[in-house]
């Protein structure tokens, strides 16, 4: 089904704690860090959005290149529509406003998107 060697698969069970001590070291070893730079033009991947209880659209994004600050303008590649960034921050696990996002961060933004 998957093209994986059995040597590359971790045997892990959250229920019994089997192999959990190997997860973080393996992630650090195998997953490469972001390759973008903060001084490049902004590029983000919007991978999820939802309407919050106060009728604001919250977008989960991954910053591929550049940096983003509250008050910046962003536009969607598909539609070309532009929006002001009303809030920006990290999830730890609650949404925590930081005012800025940098390359490699996976975080949230709030825009005037409807």
Image (spheres, grey):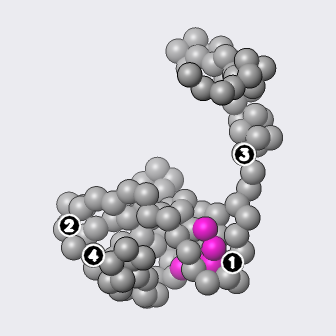
Residue 83 shows up from this direction: no
Q: Residue at x 40, y 82 (%)?
A: 75
Q: Which residue is mark 4?
A: 113
Please determine whether, in this image, residue 36 is positioned above or below residue 11: below
Would you call the spot at circle 3 few (<14 residues within 10 Å), some (14-19), or many (20 or more)?
Answer: few
- Location of residue 59 in the rendering, given as x and y in whole percent from the top left corner: 38, 64
Label 3 close to label 1 by CB (< 8 Å):
no
- Location of residue 1 in the rendering, given as x and y in whole percent from the top left corner: 56, 22
Image mark for residue 38: 1
The residue range painted magenta reads 64-68
- Location of residue 33 in the rendering, given as x and y in whole percent from the top left corner: 74, 56
* Residue at disc 3, secondary structure: loop
Sequence order check: which comes first, mark 1 or mark 2? 1
| 1 left or right of 28 in image | left
Label 2 close to label 3 by CB (< 8 Å):
no
Q: CA distance from mark 4 to mark 3?
A: 33 Å
Q: Which residue is mark 2?
A: 54
Would you call the spot at circle 1 few (<14 residues within 10 Å), some (14-19), or many (20 or more)?
Answer: some
* Residue at disc 4, secondary structure: loop
- Location of residue 2 in the rendering, given as x and y in whole percent from the top left corner: 60, 26
Q: CA distance from mark 3 to mark 1?
A: 20 Å
């Amino acid at each position: 089904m998957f093209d994986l060697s059995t040597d590359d698969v971790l045997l892990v069970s959250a229920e019994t704690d089997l192999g959990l001590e190997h997860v973080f070291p393996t992630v650090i070893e195998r997953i490469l860090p972001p390759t973008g730079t903060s001084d490049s033009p902004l590029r983000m991947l919007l991978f999820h959005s939802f309407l919050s209880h106060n009728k604001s659209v919250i977008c989960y994004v991954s910053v591929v290149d550049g940096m983003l600050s509250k008050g910046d303008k962003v536009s969607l590649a598909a539609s070309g529509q532009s929006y002001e960034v009303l809030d920006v921050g990290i999830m730890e696990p609650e949404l925590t406003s930081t005012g800025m996002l940098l390359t490699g961060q996976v975080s949230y933004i709030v825009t005037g998107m409807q």
